[in-house]
Image: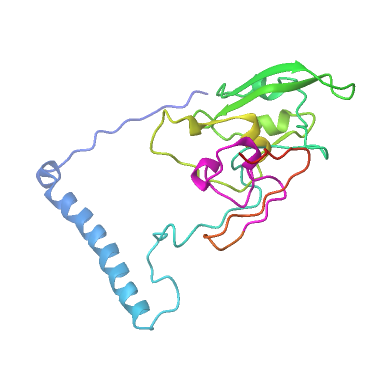
C-alpha cells in the first residue's frame, strides 16, 4: 500500500510576514545567552563559581581540547632498528587514498631483505581528509597517524611546508608540533626523531638522536 503524502499550506499572518516578531524572538535568545555567560564569568571571577563560568569557548592556545589517543593526527613513517624505513613501496596507501595526496616513487632495495624501498614519499597535507585508510591498508605497519600532532596550519597554501617528504615523515616527533623548519631544523639529519628528548627550556635546543642516520660533519 502506497503512502499518501499530504502537503498543507501554512498561512502566514501579517506580523509573520514583516518578520518583526521573529527577529525580536531571535534577539531575546541571543541576549539571554549573552547575559547568562556574562554574569557567570563575573561570578567565577569573584570566586562564587568554580567551573568554567558557563562560557563554552575554549581559550586557545592557553586551553586545549582533550584529544583522544585514537585520534587520526599527522602522519609519520615508521623505521626499522637500523633506521631504514619500514615502507616497501607496495603502493597500497597511494592506491587506496581517496584524495590522491600520497605520491611514492619506488626504487630497488640495496640489500636482499627488502626488494623495494620508497625513493620518494610525499604527502600533500592540504588534500588529506584524515580518513586513515593509508594506515589501515599498509601491510608493513609503515605509516601511522598516532603522532597526536594536530597543529600544523599555515597561512600560505603554496608553502613547501604543506608537502611532507620522506625524511620529515620518518623522523616526525610526536612531542614537537608544527614543521621542523619553524623550530630551527633545516637539514635532514637535524629532524627530531623517534628518540627525541625535548627540553622545556626554549633557550636550549633538544638533544636529538636516532639510529641509522649519520650526523653531518660540522662546516
Q: Nearer the viewer, residue 75 or 19?
A: 75
Q: Which of the pair 30/52 is nearer the observer?
A: 52
Magenta region, residue range: 172-198
Q: Residue 144 or 192: which is nearer the viewer?
A: 192
Residue 35 spot, x, y in % from top left: 26, 68
Q: Nearer the viewer, residue 43 or 58?
A: 58
The image quarter in which residue 142 lies: top right
Residue 68 lies left or right of residue 47; in this view the side is right
Q: Position of residue 123 (x, y in %)?
A: 58, 28
Q: Position of residue 195 (x, y in %)?
A: 72, 50
Q: Residue at x 63, y 57 (%)?
A: 198
Give me the residue at 71% from left, 32% from top: 136
- Looking at the picture, does residue 63 appear above or below residue 67? below
Give left or right: position of 190 versus 159: right
Name of the residue lying farthest toward the right:
112
Q: Percent x, y for residue 41?
A: 33, 73
In the rendered structure, does residue 40 fall within the stretch colored magenta? no
Query: Principal SS element in the magenta part?
Result: loop
Answer left or right for 203 relative to 140: left
Quadrant of image for the C terminus: top right
Vertical relation: 88 (above or below) 204: above
Residue lying furthest bottom in this view?
Answer: 47
Within the magenta stretch, is there residue 187? yes
Amino acid at each position: 500500500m502506497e503512502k499518501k503524502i499530504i502537503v498543507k499550506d501554512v498561512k502566514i499572518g501579517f506580523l509573520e510576514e514583516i518578520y518583526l516578531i521573529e527577529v525580536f524572538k531571535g534577539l531575546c535568545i541571543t541576549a539571554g545567552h549573552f547575559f547568562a555567560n556574562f554574569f557567570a564569568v563575573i561570578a567565577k571571577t569573584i570566586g562564587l563559581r568554580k567551573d568554567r563560568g558557563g562560557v563554552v569557548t575554549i581559550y586557545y592556545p592557553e586551553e586545549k581540547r582533550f584529544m583522544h589517543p585514537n585520534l587520526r593526527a599527522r602522519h609519520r613513517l615508521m623505521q626499522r632498528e637500523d633506521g631504514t624505513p619500514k615502507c616497501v613501496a607496495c603502493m597500497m596507501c597511494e592506491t587506496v587514498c581517496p584524495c590522491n595526496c600520497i605520491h611514492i616513487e619506488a626504487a630497488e632495495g640495496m640489500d636482499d631483505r627488502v626488494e623495494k624501498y620508497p625513493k620518494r614519499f610525499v604527502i600533500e597535507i592540504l588534500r588529506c581528509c584524515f580518513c586513515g585508510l593509508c594506515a589501515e591498508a599498509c601491510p608493513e605497519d609503515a605509516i601511522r597517524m598516532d603522532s597526536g600532532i594536530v597543529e600544523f596550519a599555515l597561512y600560505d597554501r603554496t608553502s613547501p611546508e604543506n608537502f611532507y617528504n620522506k625524511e620529515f615523515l620518518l623522523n616526525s616527533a610526536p612531542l614537537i608540533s608544527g614543521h621542523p623548519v619553524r623550530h630551527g631544523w633545516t637539514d635532514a639529519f637535524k629532524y627530531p626523531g623517534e628518540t627525541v628528548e625535548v627540553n622545556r627550556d626554549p633557550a636550549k635546543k633538544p638533544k636529538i638522536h636516532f639510529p641509522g642516520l649519520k650526523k653531518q660533519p660540522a662546516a
